[in-house]
Structures are given as structure tokens and as C-alpha cells.
Amino acid sequence: MPREYLVATYAEPGALVDAVTRIRAHGFKIYDVYTPCPVHGLDEAMGLRRSRLGYVAFVAGALGMIAALLFQFYCAVWSWNVNVGGKPDNSTLAFIPITFEITILAAGLATAKVFLARSGLLPGATAQLAASGVTDDTFAIALRWRNTVFDTGEARRVLTESGAIEIRQTEMDL
Amino acid sequence: MSSPVRALDTDRIHAVRRRRWIDEPLALSEITDDVARPLNTWPSMGWFAAFGVAVTALAIGVACVTYEIATGIGTWGLNRTVGWAFDITNFVFWIGIGHAGTLISAILLLFRQQWRTSINRSAEAMTIFAVICAALFPLIHMGRPWLFYFVIPYPNQRGSLWPNFRSPLLWDVFAINTYLTISLVFWYVGMIPDFATLRDRADGIRKRIYAALCLGWNGSYRTWTRYEAASLILAGLATPLVLSVHSIVSMDFAVSILPGWHTTIFPPYFVAGAVYSGFGMVLTLLILTRSLMHLERYITIRHLDAMAKVTLLTGSIVGLSYATELFTAWFNGSIYEKAMFYNRATGPYWLAFWTMVSCNALMPQLLWLRRLRTSAAGLFVLSIFVNLGMWLERFVIIVTSLHRSYLPSSWVMYRPTFIEVGTLIGSFGLFFTCFLLFIRLLPMIAMWEIKAGADVRVEEAADHA
């Protein structure tokens, strides 16, 4: 759904981090920042919390591990036990390599899938850029503009002071 | 403004270290232009020549494999005693090549080695193509490759009769498929931001393709933080994975009771050999590519130097493993082990053995010379010897152990036929065809990672001003 945003652009990452710190200190909420690459120190400046993807990887890996172990046990002991060289049906140690591989596979696929889904990166998704060049060499800050609770003059002043190259007020579907 | 305390700040030390890898400061848009240029221009004559050779090699391989499948596995030089010779040699060789890609993209990411950013994308691509080449050999060796799905545990009308989970060959199936899948995911996720960059530069059909590939990436920083977390997790998963894959490949041998195979040193020995051969191939490819695509600014002599050092380290581990095998053969008191080693060194395949020792244990020691490490031509020649040596290592391990095992009545000689050699040539053709298409169709240098490194330099410059 298109909404109104105040978008300020910057040419270099240092100015961007300073600007983000300054804007937040003035009590404005940052909708998002758009950059062509990860910027050192921007997570802290934006106050973003740590990603919880690690938990996803752990849970998926644990489930994969249990499933692989149980499945091999089911096949080799329960469903149809075949005597190979007199080895015991339940050769648990020999099941470990496959269990390990399935653990990694489940954790990796789940991490990638959840990351893409959570970030809205889906097949057929289209992107609207906050400013031209944010995938090349431009850094942009977007503030949600609401005419009831937004001091546009103050916001523009802070953004200008922080070294913005250009400030635009536009309607977009970010 | 710099005080002694500030100068010791670890972040700044890292920043200074990072700065070395690319010579001149580059504007961010310049990086985009340099990497995207080959994708928008008509390929050079050099590229067409290389592509022609690669496709010809591939065609030879396709013809040989077609003939082999139509006629039967007897067209190969394999026999009852040496049943594993050429295909498993090539399989282990190609899997090993892939390992350097994962080492560069995952392990060096965890170690925060900045120099990986220029080469990780192409090394990952190399991994994927190498694993595809590797997977082809067991498939072809099945004789009836259309029945490959018998190795997958699926409910069937034969019982269900399940595959034997105690067999290292089945472990291999899972290891290789997991490795291929995770490498593909890692490679693709790594390219998403670059696809978005290309989308915003292109028009027409190319724009539509890149737009579809980048899944609606818009550079949001909330996505970036998750993206970095996901990359680290995938790297953390790929690291034990890559170690496990070649360990499992080595267990194909180590779990048997054949002299020369039945040793506990095999997993670490194979992993070191894999990384060594992989770096050999990375050097071969990147030295060619950097001049072919004019990317000397990004893949500098210092990158080659760093890769040469890894080659030296892993080559030394391989040399140490050879010495350990020799020592064990002499020390463990088993006459079969001793006879096998003696046969390797002085038997009918002595030439393969000693070429292997000189290529893998002696030649990398030349890399102690700084002059060689900083010479692109010298490294290229050396990398060819590394590839040759590591191929021969697998040949020596497989053929010499099989052709004279416990029962003298089944001792035979093995010699590859034209069909086998043609299949090997075909696998090189497939590998290079894929790689040459990759450098024309996809961004072969990770633009966003280079920019993230360049961005440190900008801060530095601002601090010093």
C-alpha cells in the first residue's frame, strides 16, 4: 500500500551512520535505511535487535537430526532388516554420517527459507527503490510521513544538518 | 586528532589491514561498473576461443558417454580386480576441486579474511560445477544411470527394501547431495543483492530476468542485517559440511580392509589434499580469468600470494601425510602394508607414484619463495602441476591398491581405454563450459562485499582528513 515518506539520500556511509544517530536522538522513528552494502555500525545506530535466525537454524537442525536417525533406525531395524556381513541391525554409529548430513541440510535450507520469507524476498516480488542508486552507490533514509504527528520542518532541518544531499517527500510502496 | 589510545583501537587496525587488498581507492559506482561491464559487452576473441575448446571437449565426453551407455560398461578398461579405477579417481578428484570454493566462501568468512571478497563468488561457482562433474562419474559408472534412484530410500514394491545405511557409498550419496544443495543455496543467496544492482542498470528482457532472480531486493537495511546473520549461519553450517564431505569420501576407502586403503589417517589426509587441489584449480582459473576479463584491480598479486600460502600449507600437510603413510607401512609390521607401499613406489605404476610425490610434496615447497608467490605466470605453471599431482594421487591410491591385493591369482594391470580418457576430457569440458558461461552471465565478483570493504576505506579517509 503506497504511503508518504520523507527520503533523504547520502553519498557515503559515514555520514549516513551519523545522520541515523542524530535523527533518532531527535525522537524521529526511522522507517528503514537503504544501502548498496552492509555498513559498519549502522545496526547499532538504528537500534536493530539481533536476528533470531540462529534459533531457526538450531531447531531445524535438531529436527533434521532426530528425523534422520529415526528413519534409518526404522528402515534398518523395524521395516526390513538385512544382514550385511553380520553387522548388528541397529548399527547406530554407522548411521551418524547420514544423520550429520541431514542435520546440516535441514538447518541450511530452513535458514535460507525463513530469511527469504521474513524479508519478503519471494518469487515474483517487485521492488520499489527509495531513491535511485540505492543498489549502486547511494545511501537513503526513509521516514514515515504522517500529517498528524510529524514536524516536517524539524525533520527536514535535522536531515539537512546531517549532510543529506537531497530530501524528497514522496508517496511510495516501500 | 590521533592519540596513542585511538591508534591501538582494534577496529582501526582491522580497517588498516583491510585496506591493503585492493590498490587504489574505488568509488562505489566504479565497482559496479567494473564488475557489470563484462555482462553488457560482447565477449572477446579470447573468450570465444576458450569457449570453443571447452565445448569441443564437452562434445567428446558426451560422445564417449553415449557410446559407453549404449554398449555397456565393458568399453572401459575396468576389470574384475580393478573395478573402481577411472571413474572413482575422477569422482574424488572433482569433489576435491570443489572444496577450495567452500573454504574460501565459508571458512574464510568465519575467520573474517577480507581478501576472500574478490574471489569467493567465482570459487563458489567452481565448487558447484566441480561437484556436478564429480556426481556424473558414479552415475555413469552405474552402467544403467536411469536407475540411479535406487540409492534413494523411498518406499518401493520390493519390500520395502531399503538401501544399506551402513555403507560408506550411501553416506557419499547423502554427503554429495547435501554439499551440492547447500553450496547452491549459499551461492544464490550471496548473489541476490548483486542481481538487484544489475536489475537497476539493465533494461528489457535482462531487467526482467534479474528482477525475477533478485526476488524484490530493495536494499533495506533491516533485510541486510538478517542477510548477514543468514550468511554467517550458512557459513557456519558449510564449514563442518565441507570437512565431512571429503572425510566421508575417504571412508569409501578407509572402511575397507584393503592394504593402502585401511588407514585412519585418510579423513584429514583427504581433506587437506582436497583443499590443496582445489586451490590449485582456483589459481588456474583466476589467473586466466583476471587477465581475460581485465580484473587485475580486484584480483591482485596479493590475492594470488594469499592463495599460494594456503596452497603451501595444505601441500605441506599432504607431504606430511605421505611421510606418515611410509612410516606406518614400515612400522606397523603388516607384510601386506609393506608390500603394498613397496609396490606403489617401485611396481609397474612407479612413474605415477613419483610424479605424484614431486607434484604434491616437493613442488609446493617452492612457494616459500616470495618471487614465485608474486608471479602470476609462475603460479599458473605450478597450479597445473598441483592439478596433475592430485589427480595422480587418487589414481595411485585406487589403482595400486586394487591391482595387487591379497590374492596373487587376481593380480592384473589396469590401463584406461579411449572411452575413459574421453570421459575425463568431457568432464573438463563441462567444467570449463559452465565456468566460461558463468563469467559472462553472472557477476563473478561479489560487488556488495567489495563495497562493504571499500566503505571502511571511506571512513578511514574521513578520519585522516
Image: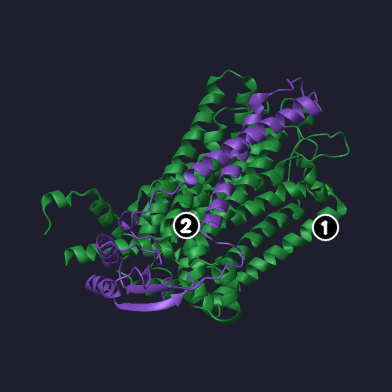
Query: What is the C-alpha distance between the residues marked 1 and 2?
Result: 38 Å
Residue occupied by mark 1: B67
State the SS at label 1. helix
The residue type indicated by label 2 comes to Asn
Spot occupied by residue A28 in the image (x, y as percentages of width and height): 31, 64
Residue at the spot 37% in from the left edge and 53% down from the top edge: A48
Q: Is residue B229 rendered to the left or right of residue B53?
A: left
Furthest-front residue in view? A148
Q: Is residue B218 rendered to the left or right of residue A66?
A: left
Residue occupied by mark 2: B120
Judge by depth and name the residue closer to the eye, A39 or B275.
A39
Spot occupied by residue B84 in the image (x, y as percentages of width and height): 72, 40
State the SS at label 2. helix
Same subunit, tags 1 and 2? yes
Chain painted in green in the figure? B
The residue type indicated by label 1 comes to Tyr
Task: Give the mark nearest the N terminus, 1 or 2.
Answer: 1
Label number found at residue A29 = none
Give the foreground label among 1 and 2: 2
Q: Does residue B311 show up?
A: no
Spot occupied by residue B208 in the image (x, y as percentages of width and height): 59, 75
Chain painted in purple in the figure? A
Subunit of label 2:
B
Spot occupied by residue A64 in the image (x, y as percentages of width and height): 62, 38
